[in-house]
Image: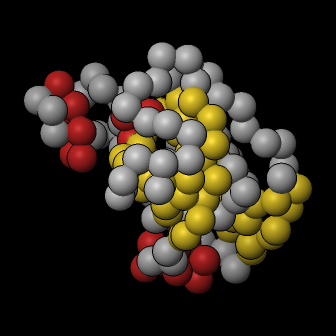
Amino acid sequence: MKAVRYYGKEDLRVEEIDEPQTRPGTVKIAPAYNGICGSDLHLYHDGPIPPAPTTEDAHPLSGETLPVVLGHEFSGVVEELGEGVEGLSVGDSVVVEPLMVDGTCPACQRGAYNLCEQMGFIGISGLGGGLSEHIVVESRWVHPVGPPGG
C-alpha cells in the first residue's frame, strides 16, 4: 500500500509499505480525510521533536524509530474488525483518537490518559498514520460518527 513516511527535517516520501493486519481488539480503517496541523509543520520544518522518535531513539510505546507514517488527525471507513471488537461495523464512518498511552503511570491510573507520562501519537510516534491507504488501530481509539454504516 502507499503511505507518506516522515524521515526527518524536510524529508517526506510516498512509499510502498506492507498493509497492516488486524489483531484481536483492533480495527482496520481506510483513511478518508487527514488534517495537516502545526505539529506536522514543525516536524517537517524543524526535524523530529518529542513525541516523534528519531533515527536513533525509538518512541518508548511504539518501539519505532524514523521513518514513520504521518497523519494523526484523520477519519475514515471501517474495513475490517479484529476478533472481540464490539460496537463497530464494517462500513462505519469513524474518527480516530490518535493516542498511545502506557496505562501504568499515575495519570493513566487516574483515568487521565491524556496526561500520560510516555504519551505518543499514532501518525507521529509510530503505529501507522492517516496518510496511508490502510491503518490498524486499537478499537478503544475508534469512534463512530453519523448513523451506523454511513
Closer to the camera in the image, 16 or 120: 16
Q: Is residue 143 left or right of residue 31?
A: left
Residue that extends furthest to the left in the rendered view of this protein = 110
Q: Is residue 57 left or right of residue 99?
A: right
Q: Give percent across and percent down for residue 127.
A: 59, 42
Question: As displayed, is residue 147 above or below residue 109?
Answer: below
Q: Give percent across and percent down for residue 132.
A: 70, 59
Q: Give percent across and percent down for residue 56.
A: 67, 47
**How was the colour assigned to the protein in this rendering?**
secondary structure
Question: As displayed, is residue 18 above or below residue 150?
Answer: above
Identify the residue shown where x is 24% and y is 39%.
113
Closer to the camera in the image, 75 or 99: 75
Any part of residue 37 in sight: yes
Identify the residue shown where x is 46% and y is 24%.
85
Identify the residue shown where x is 55% and y is 70%.
33
Q: Give percent across and percent down for residue 25.
A: 49, 23
Identify the residue shown where x is 48% and y is 16%.
84
Residue 81, quarter of picture: top right
Q: Is residue 67 left or right of residue 118?
A: right
How many marks the image carries: the answer is 0
Question: As displayed, is residue 93 above or below residue 108?
Answer: below
Any part of residue 96 in sight: no
Closer to the camera in the image, 7 or 70: 70
